[in-house]
Image: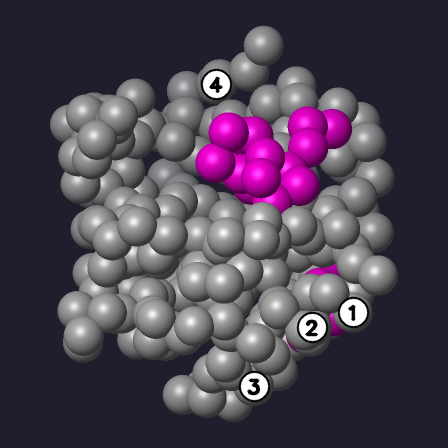
Amino acid sequence: MTRVDDVLVEITPEVLLKAYACGIFPMAESAQDPGLYWIEPDLRGVIPLDGFHVPNRLARTVRSDRFEIRVDQDFDAVISACAAPAPGRRKTWINRRIRKLYSDLFDIGHCHTIEAYEHGRLVGGLYGVRLGGAFFGESMFHTSRDASKVALVHLAARLVAGRFNLLDTQFVTEHLEMFGAVEVPRRDYHHLLESALPGNGNFFVWPKGQTISGAEALAILKKTSS
């Protein structure tokens, strides 16, 4: 079961970061619902960075550099795309307050995007929160096949190279299972979180504006998982 508590106080970026440090995060019932709720799943989704798996077919796509990967270039476009209806997802939990909160986190350097472009057009990506040695994935989208998956591979390579300890996915989906996502009980998750937070993950292990090739990303992940 997931515990949900009504939010009775104004949430600021600082409060939000403290919540992440305690293992909870906010969601809304729908884009139209102005309220927010604290979520703390009994089973938490994580992808072990030392066992990140890239299926063979996807690895070929990553290696081809079909998508141009950019970082933190267009947060508004990414969160808008994550909030838009998509096949199999007619409604979203990203409401106006969520957009404002994570935009503020982005402005102070604690929220990041990985973006996939095809022929100069944004076709996939994800956003999430960075705190210490932990990265909390929030949402992802794609309008071109494999675009969000390639973005996730590049995120994982960046986290490994930047010496992060935890990649939190909140929940486990079939989409994430292919990468090695697992569910861990709340108690075990808190141990993982407590170990990761004192770390000093370097999200910009490659300077802003610099990205790596798909082959380089795969090599980093292979070295870690071998």
Mark 3 or mark 1, earlier in chain: 3
Q: Position of residue 66 (x, y in %)?
A: 34, 71
Residue at 77% across / 36% down in the picture?
190
Q: How is the image coloured?
A: one colour
- Relative to 12, residue 87 above or below: above
The answer to whether marks 3 and 1 mark residues whose Cβ atoms lie closer than 8 Å is no
Q: Are marks 2 and 1 in contact (CB under 8 Å)?
A: yes
Residue named by callout 4: 5
- Above or below, 145 against 157 in this view is above
In the rendered image, which residue does mark 3 sit on?
A: 206
For the residues marked 3 and 2, what is the alpha-carbon distance in whole angstroms?
Answer: 13 Å
Where residue 63 appears, x then y in whole percent?
Answer: 50, 71
Disc 2: which residue: 220
Describe the element under mark 2 as helix, strand or loop.
helix
Residue depicted at 57% across the width and 76% down the height: 215
Label whose residue precedes the other's in the sequence (3 or 4): 4
* Any part of residue 135 in sight: yes
| Residue 30 marker | none
Mark 2 and mark 1: Cα distance apart in space: 5 Å
Q: Residue at x 23, y 41 (%)?
A: 83
Q: Quadrant of residue 160?
A: bottom right
Could you give the CA–CA distance between mark 4 and mark 2, rounded to whole angstroms?
40 Å
Q: Residues within 10 Å of mark 3 (few under 14, many from 20)?
A: few
Report the magenta residues as a range: 162-184
Q: Nearer the viewer, mark 4 or mark 2?
A: 2
Tell me the CA gap for discs 3 and 1. Answer: 18 Å
